[in-house]
Image (spheres, rainbow, N blue to C red):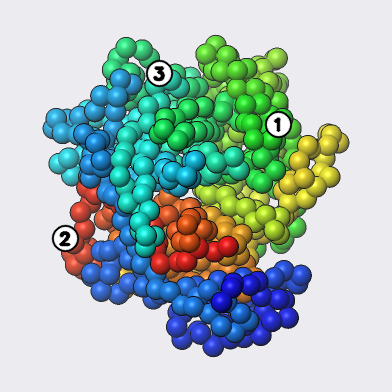
Amino acid sequence: MKNVWISLAAAAALAVSFVGCANDDSTTDSNTTAVAAGVEATKVEFIGMSAPSSADEMSSAYSNAKVRVYTSETEYTEHNLSYTTLFNVKDKVGTNPYQAGQIYNYKMEPVLDPMNEPVLAETPDSNSLLNVGGKLFLVSHLEYDWILSDGSKAYSYPSWYSRMPMSMLLTSIEQDADGKLIASEQKAIDFSSVNGLWIPCFGSQTPWNTHLGSEEDYDLYYTASNGSSLASAEAGIKALTEVYFDNTKTAKAYDYGYITEVEVKSDASTTITKHYSMGKGTWEMAKVLDDGKTAYFGDDGSNVGMFMYVADKANDLSAGTLYAAKWNQTSTPGSTDGGSAYLTWMKLGHHSNAEVASYKDIYTFSDIFEYIAPADYNGTLPAGYKALKAGSTSTEYLRLVDGMDDVASALEPRRYAAWLGATTEWNKMEGVAYNAQDKKLYMAMSYIDKGMKEDGSFEIDHIKVAKNNCGGTYEISLSAGQKDINGNMIASDLVATSMHVPSGLLGEEIATDANGNTCSVDKIANTDNVFFSDKMRTLFIGEDSGTHTNNFVWAYNVDTLKLSRILSLPAGAEATGLQVVDNENGHAYIMSNAQHLADFTKTTPDSVKNAVEGKIDKFNAPFGYISGIPGIK
């Protein structure tokens, strides 16, 4: 029977039938019957799974959830979901002579660890499954190196490096008659043309069918020292210089921290572009909306900002204008629901890739800001200085050098945003997803904490909400006809104007349970990856939690408000690589990886560790997908 959209009148009746399925789905929201006025309900319903209970379940990546695809108002087909691994970081795929997780220097030579063994990244992250001229390719991130070959934590091994230069993989994918995806060929992508890659975290897909990656500039971000000067985190520069460049050149901090576009061609060649015009940051990701111009970022870290980029031309990120938001709270200070606010926007600057590329090669931090180290601060700021928190919970005492506004807005947009009065109080801002039909944005806040709490000790305090160690996902309304704070029109019809956390997307703290969970296992904890499927009317959410012993992937229907657990990952592992492909030759796929397996939380009991640790290969990690979903048209 042909699939049809369900009318609004029928949707209310169908929502009631969903309630009748509550015994099949332990994570049904209490507001299941709610349907947004004027919005057609989805034709897809996920039937969730219970949290893992046995050692075998807790040590595995698995799904026993189901999905119902409605063919009429009352009829549906039901399909079992399962998790399929495409390949692991220890696998060799196709003619690639090296394991998938291998890390390389600028000459694409494999990097070896202190034991003379390959440095493998056990941290698969972003996925983009792309159809290029009828051929399927998967672009995937390797985020960082977690453990060395002897099991030591990489960051704590004597005379080793806290992090390694990273890379992305390009994998050719075949699809068999049953819809199974098969990794047939693979190569590491060469980033030497852009001086390498640093901590590529989450990513997205552009409206013009390219992969949009990220660089979190941890370890390269300048922070105030306790001495008489401002010091960079030298570990990252050291690793790039000695490991990536093999001491042939010295790495520079301003070469990293950008959104990176990968265009894949049908012959498996790639074109790499770092979009310097979008500014340097600790970018979790950037999401370009369906106008091809407006992009929003996840700015990961403490005391971070909310940024919007508007390109000059559709489907072209080589030049545009960067804005920063100010949170104007409308909820009561100390509110426990994540708070609510309307947003206003400050223009930071307009740049091209070429312009910022020239800046990064010329200027240092000290050219942009004068500073007073905390140890030298006597309680009184000289004229022209401001006390700021931007990228750190520590206070910095800075003065913008005269004439450096344009450079600061490109190379130091977070500090420059704080300097102008924008909000830099968000915490652990992660993934961003877009609901085109409703013109809504979803923004993950992994931990509602630190700068987001009410802070009477600091002069600037825009966000004043209660701490929630389980985090939440904010829903953001987008509007046309908006002006910046100076009264100038913003050249986008998709400007964020207000934000709050829907109740079903807010985590819930609990007393530590028998498995070490400190957030309710029947609610999302520490949301990270997010992806919205317009055709399924569903927001998919992956966790990166220090509060769930096992992390999960969830499906949240924005019309019925039903929350369903659809994937459980091995204990200690983070859910990464979330992407939904609605229809590829009659099959749908939810791409999802796991990284740093058996990296247990602080509250995981020894009894649980002892039961599951021996069942997990912590040197390995999968790239994969949730299978069993028919194509959604």
Sequence-first disc among 1 and 3? 3
Name the residue type under label 1.
Lys
Mark identifier at residue 251? 3
Q: Residue furthest bottom?
A: 20
Q: Is residue 466 above or below residue 69?
A: above
573 or 401, nearer to the observer: 573
Instruction: Provide residue 397's location: percent of width, then percent of height.
Output: 59, 27
Name the residue type under label 3.
Ala
Residue 348 visible to an observer of this rendering = no
Residue at x 31% of width, y 38% of height: 186
Q: Nearer the viewer, mark 1 or mark 3?
A: 1
Instruction: Provide residue 360's location: percent of width, then percent of height.
Output: 54, 17
Residue at x 45% of width, y 83% of height: 24
Residue at x 80% of width, y 47% of height: 480
Residue 7 visible to an observer of this rendering = yes
Q: Quadrant of the N terminus?
A: bottom right
| Residue hosting label 1 | 313
